[in-house]
Image (cartoon, rainbow, N blue to C red):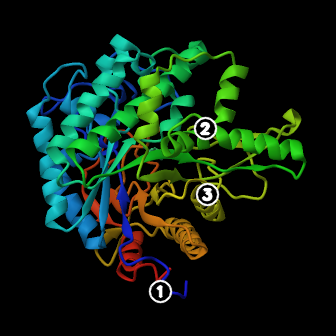
């Protein structure tokens, strides 16, 4: 990249994590269980009845005790922002009680203290795949409308406690993923193949209303806060120029775009209502719900971007590839990661332009990165990982972010996913690594938990220092 003025001077460079994937201490500090505590194998295997020792998230990377050391390393890279989530079950161990757990609140005070010490702006996800287990077991998660009130109470506690210190908030991680991973994303215990469409879309509606109520609460309790929605972005290109393929691609993309449309425009789009009708789904939507959605739209749109897929109307050509939670039809023009996620840097520019054209709201890329198996090596007495593959992936994507900014897109920032190695959401393993910082912990739970800087650590530090000119 030649133009050093491409990235705005206040561009929020940083990294992203989620509580259940880094904190560990799953039963410390008064924390209750979350659905992650019964998902030892990630999203591929049915849940367990209770916590099991084989769940790497019980310790994860021990951020709960090592947060100061880790945030200092982020500061060394020059992070302007750090995205983390608050574990709902640390604040409300069961989820439906009236008073919060002070020890849980105090932990995030300390995390925010550390961020402030280093001039790092916290970016907080209120709910990142961490529904309290009691809410899943007693209410079947978001299928039940009572969840709206529990979430609102939780969000209000957060805004009251941290609202003066945290500017950027995301209501739900990848809110559209509930369509594909109802337990992890929605705390819904009913197995996906037995979940009725009506229950699924009612759960989505309940989350959307809760998201609007959180925005409303923030306006009251934290007037300087900026509230964003967060969607899993995955372009679905037509597999061919056949108009039927183009229409199929549009229909698939709309399953994701609907979530941004509703958060930004405050109402259900016609195509979404039609799709509900076509599926025979009748939702309970009150006039008050409609008013809440309309009056409490978001300040910005954030999203994860890892890959794109293709789409076709021709069933015989629907070769399904792997991918982030939803996956899709394989695109023969693209390479893929070790986990079959197809790598498409230009897709990020396409998504940024599409979202900007559609919503005219500032955009925040809050997840992007390459999961890979890393090899720890020793060079001149220092342990490190030579992760050129990760540097290449991130560099190629960030070049496209620069292109989008040059196209006129308003991009607020970029937080690379798993800036420190963490437990993978889909596989629940540590060997799928994303970090700039290697954590010595293996899939069998062995390891010292020591941290080592990878080659990409120094690369990213220079990207941030030069504000993207080094790309
Ligand atoms: C997103 C999730 C993250 C993260 C990431 C990478 O869907 O928001 O929690 O895990 O994907 O996925 P994985 O860990 O499965 O490689």
As rendered, which of 2 and 280 lies closer to the eye? 280
Left or right of 32: which side holds 311? right
Q: Please, is residue 286 above or below residue 215 in the view?
A: above
**Pair 1/2: label in front:** 1
Residue at image coords 56%, 67% = 397
Mark nearer the N terminus (1 vs 3)? 1
Q: Secondary structure at mark 2?
A: loop
- Residue 20 seen from this side: no
Snapshot quadrant of residue 446: top left
Mark nearer the N terminus (1 vs 2)? 1
Whole-percent x and y of residue 9? 37, 78
Q: Please, is residue 188 above or below residue 110 in the view?
A: above
Whole-percent x and y of residue 381? 28, 74
Distance from disc 1 to disc 2, alpha carbons, whole Å, reads 36 Å
Q: Which residue is mark 2?
A: 326
Left or right of 52: which side holds 178? right
Distance from disc 3 to disc 2, alpha carbons, whole Å, reads 17 Å
């Amino acid at each position: 990249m030649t133009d050093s003025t491409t990235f705005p001077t206040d561009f929020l460079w940083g990294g992203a994590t989620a509580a259940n994937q880094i904190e560990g201490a799953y039963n410390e500090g008064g924390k209750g269980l979350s659905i992650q505590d019964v998902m030892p194998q990630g999203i591929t295997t049915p849940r367990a009845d209770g916590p099991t020792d084989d769940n790497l998230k019980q310790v994860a990377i021990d951020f709960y005790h090592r947060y100061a050391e880790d945030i200092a390393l982020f500061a060394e890279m020059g992070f302007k922002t750090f995205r983390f989530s608050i574990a709902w079950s640390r604040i409300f161990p069961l989820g439906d009680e009236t008073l919060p757990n002070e020890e849980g609140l105090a932990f995030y005070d300390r995390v925010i203290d550390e961020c402030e010490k280093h001039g790092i702006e916290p970016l907080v996800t209120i709910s990142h795949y961490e529904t309290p287990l009691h809410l899943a077991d007693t209410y079947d998660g978001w299928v039940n409308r009572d969840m709206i009130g529990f979430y609102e109470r939780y969000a209000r506690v957060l805004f009251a406690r941290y609202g003066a210190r945290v500017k950027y908030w995301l209501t739900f991680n990848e809110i559209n993923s509930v369509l594909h991973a109802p337990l992890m994303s929605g705390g819904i215990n009913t197995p996906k193949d037995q979940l009725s469409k009506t229950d699924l879309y009612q759960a989505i509606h309940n989350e959307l209303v809760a998201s609007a109520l959180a925005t409303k609460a923030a306006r009251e309790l934290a007037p300087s806060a900026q509230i964003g929605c967060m969607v899993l972005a995955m372009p679905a290109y037509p597999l061919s120029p056949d108009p039927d393929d183009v229409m199929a691609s549009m229909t698939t993309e709309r399953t994701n775009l609907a979530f941004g449309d509703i958060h930004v425009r405050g109402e259900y789009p016609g195509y979404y209502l039609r799709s509900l009708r076509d599926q025979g789904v009748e939702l309970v939507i009150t006039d008050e719900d409609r008013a809440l959605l309309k009056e409490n739209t978001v300040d910005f749109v954030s999203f994860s971007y890892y890959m794109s897929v293709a789409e076709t109307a021709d069933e015989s050509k629907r070769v399904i590839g792997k991918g982030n939670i939803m996956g899709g039809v394989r695109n023969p023009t693209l390479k893929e990661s070790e986990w079959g996620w197809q790598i498409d840097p230009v897709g990020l520019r396409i998504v940024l332009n599409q979202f900007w054209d559609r919503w005219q709201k500032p955009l925040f890329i809050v997840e992007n990165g390459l999961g890979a198996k890393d090899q720890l090596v020793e060079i001149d007495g220092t342990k490190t990982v030579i992760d050129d593959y990760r540097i290449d992936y991130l560099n190629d994507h960030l070049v496209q972010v620069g292109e989008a900014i040059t196209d006129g897109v308003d991009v607020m920032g970029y937080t690379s996913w798993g800036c420190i190695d963490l437990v993978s959401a889909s596989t629940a393993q540590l060997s799928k690594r994303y970090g700039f910082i290697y954590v010595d912990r293996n899939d069998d739970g062995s390891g010292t938990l020591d941290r080592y800087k990878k080659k990409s650590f120094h690369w990213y530090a220079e990207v941030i220092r030069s504000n993207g000119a080094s790309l």
